[in-house]
Amino acid sequence: MKQAIPILATIALVVVVAVVASLTPREVLPDPLSQLRARYSQSHESPVDHSKFPQLQKDFKKPQEVTEACISCHNGRHIEVMNSNHWNWEREEYIQGRGVVYLGKRNAVNNFCLAAQGNELACAKCHVGFGMTSVKTFDFNDPRNIDCLVCHDGTGTYAKASNAGGAPSPDVDLALVASSVGRPQRSNCGVCHFYGGGGNNVKHGDLEEALFEPSRDVDVHMAVDGANMQCVDCHLTEKHQIRGQLYSLSSMNRNRVTCEQCHTSTPHEKEILNEHTLKVACQTCHIPIYAKVNPTKLYWDWSTAGKLRDGKPYRETDAEGNIIYLSEKGTFRWGKNLKPDYVWFNGTATHYLLGDKIADASKPVELNRFNGSYADPDAKIFPVKVMRTNQCYDPVNNILVAPKLFAPKPGEGAFWKDFECIRAIEVGMKERGLPFSGQLGFVETIAYWPLNHMVSPKEKAVRCSECHTRQGSRIANLKDFYIPGRDYLPLVDTAGKALVILTAVGVLAHGGLRVAVSLKRRREGSS
């Protein structure tokens, strides 16, 4: 009995500890998604009331006076802005086969309004500066021309004037806006980024004015009835250097904004889904459709531009009010609630630069070809919008051409004023120092626009059966790898069917023989 006492005491102690542990309240940590919701549900309160600064309590005659007042307190911030691509309209990039180039709005070619250079009075409406009539003459070293208010306006009343080189609209109350500045909101970013290409949702397809106040179905992150996140919550900013680069203009895989920076690379409860993140971008499954609210432009035919009625430009619209013809720009096609196209993408791209030779004008010219393949360890399947345009080119020099589109008044060679195409191209190419033979042709161009916004709730993500299917797979165009459910070999299928049939025949034959032998033995036994 004495020997059993220590054992019984030990058992009793273990039981007591177990009971106490089970009754002690445990701290249950929220799951990662709940932590993110809690973090971003807190509204940002400015620690400073700018309306009390005497520097801002004055009647500003010019926007430059506001900038000077900003710099008088925010010493050195203007230098940060002047080092940004929002100011310089270009950044240093390495393009494979070209080496280091400076790429941006200054020299990029697109297949919407074609090019910003030469049309700065109109295009500089989306420059963070004032007074840009030409990138060649604009003083990028003058900090007084920085437009602080376009990004920091807290009133929602600040607006740039049309065709004024970035100047604010004359009716803006500069003193009111200057005294109400704060952290950039979606409305600040959206006034430029939602209207790229000349109108709402024209360019991107996943960036449009519906995102000013979206519902959760439109975008789960920005939803006013959800996390209500602002652009700068993901596009983290340090010293006015905003993380994230426009993929269609960035040839290097650097300074990206990624889903993984919050959600990690293994965010799912099911391991089979986490395994997909190795080769499938988050956006591929979680952006099943884009252009959810308003349509986006999918096709542009510049060859029909320039028609006039009674000597005047005109427009035509479809039943939904979308412009389908404009004398200044040609013919358009739109789309809404669209399934993305899918490409392999490793974060790098090639770019057509004005003056590049067209190898074969009978084939579409890719303005920004995305690099990647299944064999590329850095590549993932990525959703994109594909923009196609029938674009003007010089068939003698075999290069795309950029006509001068805008001028303040007729007679300066701008197409949107004079409607003389050849003349507009002559002026536009001369301004860029590039040749033009005088011959005009048209070639199809393709541009890829990665989709990163309009993220749907997880309940509406792409289902497994939408890719793993033989009929109408979303990724039917990606043929350099095997995917279960989509791909098969007829020989293997035939062999499998034959094997099943032979197995069934074998089983039936074996069973039949055993039944026959059994019956025979019974008969022999009874006799």
Image (tube, rainbow, N blue to C red):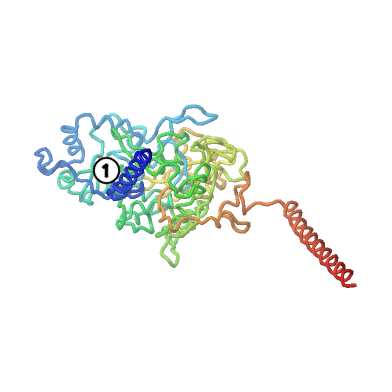
Packing grade of label 1 (10 A; few <14, some 14-19, many >=20) is many
Left or right: where 6 falls relative to 367:
left
Left of 515 or right of it: where is 95? left
Taking depth in this image into account, of 434 and 494 the one nearest to the observer is 494
The three-letter code of the residue at mark 1 reads Cys
Placement of 294 over or under 109, stated as above or below: below
Residue 250 picture quarter: top left
Q: Nearer the viewer, residue 450 or 327?
A: 450
Residue 397 shows in this picture: no
- Residue 373, how many percent across, how many down? 58, 40
Image point 73% across, 54% down: which residue?
496
Residue 169, position in %: x, y? 24, 48
In-image side of 266 versus 515 (left or right)? left
Q: Position of residue 195 (x, y in %)?
A: 37, 50
Residue designated by label 1: 151
Nearer the observer, 161 or 277: 277
The answer to whether residue 122 of the structure is visible from this angle is: yes
Say which element carries label 1: helix
